[in-house]
Image (tube, coloured by chain):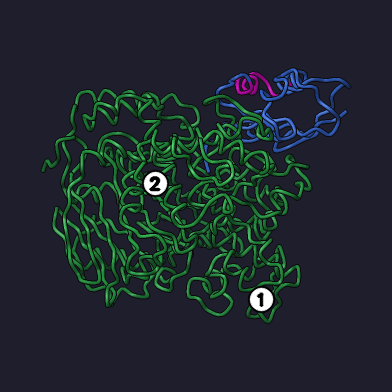
Amino acid sequence: MKTGSKFGGYNNRILRVNLTNRTFREETLSEELIHDYAGGRGFGAKFLYDDLKPGIDPLGEKNEIISLTGPITGTTAQAFSRWKVTFKSPLTGAYFTSSAGGHFAPEQKAAGFDVIIVDGVADKPVYLWVHDGKYELRDAGYLWGLDTDDTQALIRDELNDPRIRIACIGPAGERLVKYAAVITDRRAAGRGGGGAVMGAKNLKAIAVRGSGEPALADPDAFQAAVKEQIQTFKTNKPIQRHSVVGTQEPEFTLVLGMFPTRNFQEGVLPHWERIESTEYDKLRVRKTACYRCMVHCGSISRMYHGDYQGAWSEGPEYETAWAFTGPAVISDIGMTIAADKLCDDLGLDTISTGNTIGFAYELYERGIISKEDTDGFELNFGNKEPILELVRKIAYRQGFGDLLAEGTREAARRIGKGAEQYAIQVKGLELPAYHPRGAKAHGLNLLTSSLGADHNAGYGNQEIFNAPAPKPVDRFAVEGKGQVTKYNQDITAMMNTGILCNFIVVMQGVTPELYAKLLSAATGVADFADPAYQWKIGERIVNLERMFNIREGLGRKDDVFPKRITDEPMPSGPSKGQVFEAHLLLPDYYKARGWDMETGIPTKAKLKELGLEFTLK
Amino acid sequence: MNVNVLFFGRFRELAVRDRLVPLKEGARLADLLEQLNQEYGDEFRNEVNNKEQVHILVNGQFHNILEDINTQLQDGDVVVLMPLATGG
């Protein structure tokens, strides 16, 4: 079945679902939307900006879950399987877009819809079933309370089709844990609390299946671009390495001394030889891959010995390999695998979960909380015994877990006693597995992204992987880092329209020139052939996301790290002595962006240049 | 003087996980690499010379950000030889 629009690559169909009234509405994509935002993250930012009034409750009926594909989704191009889900975050109170690999986005597109927008609140648990252009809400009462693995299995069983793809929540999302994930297969759109937004809507899952295939504007040119891409992948050295180990190599930040340890007090984990890539190599059962991706960077890992013998998970990816080791100073690879699986099953973001647990450990060690607060657990750094039980308590909001389920910023506010300074977050989003003191452009992205401390919004590959684009940089240097961060954020936003995997962006597997070829051949939009215009789309998206947050009352005051990051020199290791010089780096970034130096708001001139005048109203 | 060398990936298969390497005072990174090349043989040398696939760090800084192979080494320095790391 061929579907399409004036432009290739799109179904030209949007599905809007209101759960309160159980109504459906179809819309088409406007030419202006396609031209200005291209797809994926761009579409999500525009819809969220247009649809949401400022100040709405992220867990109320006015918030939206926007499920996004791009013009390259489902084609023969490699590594374009990424799925994006956009919403106002209950964790940050701000704009958010989360992402997962796997197979959901291609299947949604094959089911006939570029975009699915869900608002309202259902009066009882439901799931949305979308298949070959048709849609319905179905009862999810019997699924409520189930973990994500069982939920997916039972929906496939009910609909009698093992090839259905499902994005769902687990018990954590149902209980509105602020960093609950949306899980598809065993992959997570983990960050920002999209799972809680779905839980608040009584939306257990979205299930998709289809056979549609949008026509491409110029199939021959597109295939030529795909051939070029495949050839690049075959010769790209980082991609070759990534095919073997994926992200299971914690040593790459350990040797830089920026593996956050002891709740970000240090940068080197004691006994880190126990979690090196060579240890993960021993546990890898097989490789896994996303839809039409020759890189196959994923792994199934299984523990064969020790306290967690028999534990297995898909992953753990680097972030998770950190989340359950560094924050609480534990170097048990088996426990990491067990925690990874538990988070996937219960529907939790591993990054925020691990960071929040590390925060609790530090509060306990400092005497700010005691055993009376922690349900009797002794949260001394190095004690692995409480970890898995804490994960369960968070997901089910039991006892101490109910407080930790709020995330570090809100938990610290409720605890008081100076706990705020130990909440290692930006805009409410917990920091991931990179110490900003060891990589200044990477840190500057964590500080300024509209998502909060999200490493995928502008990865500092020049500093962390010595990548040469646009040029190698000294990771400790301050000068020029504003421009480097702008580059990283804009190229990421640009390539999130397709939607290309961020690993490929980081490894320079697709240049802006090749990206322009792919998008223009797929869609036939003339301007898409110009790499300079692609850069402009990226910059436009970043600025629109910023303006969403400005409208919510955020600004320069929210581009702030905890004092630990800016004032305390790294005590030891290869980043010893480093602080994050925010007083120099932030103005440099605002200047590079063309934002007001005092307020952090994009200037009128910048907004006009990007066609974002409508945000000035 | 002695420098501590950490080996990863293929380097580890050809050498060890980590070891102290004695060097003459005033030695540069090039001297260390040549000493290791001689000790571990041609395959090791090929890995080191394959600049597209190797990260060399001295005290946590990529060597091309420093003085490349002319980087002066000091007693107690930590040198890392690892395959390209790729993503996290």
Colour of chain B in the image: blue
- Above or below, A267 against B61 in this view is below
Task: Estimate the spatial distance between the alpha carbons at disc 2 and disc 1, rounded to whole Å.
Answer: 51 Å
The magenta stretch is: B39-48
Q: Dot 1 lies on which element?
A: loop
Relative image position of residue A182 (x, y in whole percent): 39, 60
Q: Which residue is mark 2?
A: A616
Asked if residue A341 can be seen in this view, the reply is: no
Q: Quadrant of residue A495?
A: top left
Q: Amino acid at mark 1?
A: Phe
Relative image position of residue A460 (x, y in whole percent): 56, 37
Q: Chain of mark 1?
A: A
In the rendered image, residue A423 lying in the magenta stretch gets the answer no
- Above or below, A426 against A366 in this view is above
User: Quick check: A324 left or right of A506?
Assistant: right
Relative image position of residue A482 (x, y in whole percent): 58, 35
Front residue of A32/A240: it is A32
Label 1: how many Cα within 10 Å (few below 14, some 14–19, many 20+): some
Colour of chain A in the image: green
Relative image position of residue A600 (x, y in whole percent): 54, 45
Q: Are marks 2 and 1 in contact (CB under 8 Å)?
A: no
Q: Which residue is mark 1?
A: A377
Q: Amino acid at mark 2?
A: Leu
Q: Chain of mark 2?
A: A
